Image (tube, rainbow, N blue to C red):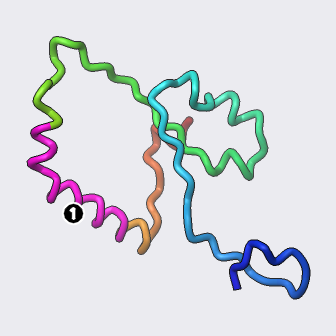
Amino acid sequence: MNDPQQSFGAAYDWRVVNRFNINSIRAAKAPTARQIALIDEAIRRRFNLIPFTVTIPPDERDEALPEKLKIELPGIMQWMINGCVDWGERTLAPPEVVAAQ
């Protein structure tokens, strides 16, 4: 039984059913690779830092992008479902650029 309130009694197995994701655009709010290196392995292995190395100049930004994405929502949802199925079947390894962080 997965009862988090069970403090005493017979031993039991805890089955992980969720993952916690931190999404941050501000690098100042996200932990740096150095900060993560200073903490123990148990916490460090739970973070995947994704480097955002490209900034689109304002004059090249597509102001109509939100509307274009709304049109593509069914395809985006299918892409997300396919990715979730792949992840569930074989787990997904992070790309080299993420693993190197």
The residue that label 1 is drawn on is 78
Image quadrant holding the C terminus, namely top right
Front-most of residues 97 and 5? 5
- The type of residue carrying mark 1 is Gln
**49 shown above or below 54:** below
Q: Which residues are magenta?
A: 67-85
- The reply to whether the magenta stretch includes residue 38 is no
**51 shown above or below 18:** above
Residue closest to the far right: 8
Residue at left offset 74%, top offset 81%: 13
Q: Quadrant of residue 84?
A: bottom left
Please, what secondary structure does the residue beneath circle 1 have? helix
Residue 92 appears at what percent x and percent y?
Answer: 44, 60
Q: Is the stretch drawn in magenta largely helix, strand or loop? A: helix
**22 shown above or below 17:** above
Residue at left offset 56%, top offset 54%: 20
Judge from the rendering whether residue 10 lies leftward or rightward of residue 99; answer left or right: right
- The reply to whether the magenta stretch includes residue 74 is yes
Judge from the rendering whether residue 36 lies leftward or rightward of residue 12; answer left or right: left
